[in-house]
Amino acid sequence: MRGFWVWGMAMLMALAWPAAGAETSQRYDVYAGGLKIGTLGLDGRVSGSRYAASGRVAGGGLIGVFVTFDFSGTSQGSIEGGRLRPEAYEARSDDGKTARTTRMRYQGGRPVSVTFDPERKPRDYDAAASGQAGTLDPIAATFALLAEAPVGAACGRSVEVYDGRRRSRLTVAPRQAGRDGTFVCDGTYTRVDGFSDKLMAERQTFPFTLIFRETAGVMQVVRFETQTTFGRVSAIRR
């Protein structure tokens, strides 16, 4: 379950950068099969050419009686040429059995240091940090996706994500008109590197959908859905 929620944060990645001076504080309720299974929170701010963001996914509702899971993290860095460039990332995951902190430091848009506390035994299929130039960490990408964005900057993009051992790709198609004045952007999450042969054989791509509402030329996410190995999961903004 812990791996699913870490992956879930990466799924909510981003393709549209928040504008200078933007600030957001958002809360979502997460459902699967009609049951509330957790919450997602995001706080972030852009000041000049700098950004800072924090996020958390936590278990709750009925499933919290049986399963403990928690993922939280922070990211900070610069914005260059309209793109987020992480400089420092830290995340903590806890499934009730194992709690681990992951830290990454960047130089020139590339992770140059990845540490785990407690130490994690390397796997031969891990994606090496040396090959991850230009990737976003999970929190930076989530902030970029969920922050309000101009109409032309939301959707129709692709981004590479690295969490310290796995690389994935998110591709979002151009927006389409939805129901009740909303707009829908369909996307695909793809496992790229750092996953076991078993997981790659099981499934490599997962569809997801972002639902926006436009107000005065600004797109705001109101809901997102994804198909996982556990079924369809939806997050609804409070």
Image (tube, rainbow, N blue to C red):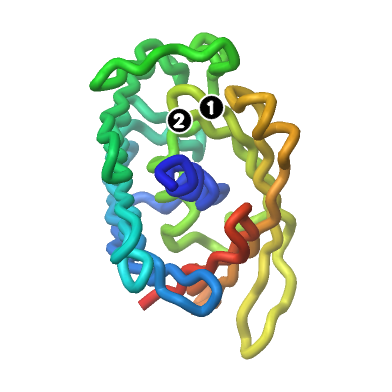
Q: Quadrant of the C terminus?
A: bottom left
Task: Count residues near mark 1 (Cα–Cα under 10 Å), then give few for <14, some for 14-19, many for 20+.
Answer: many
Q: Nearer the viewer, residue 115 or 109?
A: 115
Numbered circles on residues, count: 2
Residue depicted at 62% across the width and 25% down the height: 196
Amino acid, disc 1? Arg
Callout 1 secondary element: loop
Specify whether 167 is left or right of 19: right
- Residue type, numbered disc 2: Asp
Residue at horizontal 55%, vertical 74%?
33
Residue for badge 2: 163
Residue 25 visible to an observer of this rendering? yes
Depth check, front residue: 124 or 62: 62
Q: CA distance from mark 1 to mark 2?
A: 6 Å
Residue 204 falls left or right of residue 44: right
Residues at circles 1 and 2 in contact by the CB criterion of under 8 Å: yes
Q: Residue at x 49, y 53 (%)?
A: 145
Question: What residue did someone put label 1 on?
Answer: 166
Please, what secondary structure does the residue beneath circle 2 have?
A: loop
Q: Left of 35 or right of it: where is 156?
A: right
Can you name the residue that lies furthest to the bottom here?
180
* Above or below, 193 relative to 14: above
The x, y position of residue 237, in whole percent, is: 41, 74
Percent x, y of residue 216: 50, 77
Q: Residue at x 49, y 46 (%)?
A: 4
The image shows residue 75 at horizontal and vertical percentages of 31, 37
Residue 104 occupies quadrant: top left
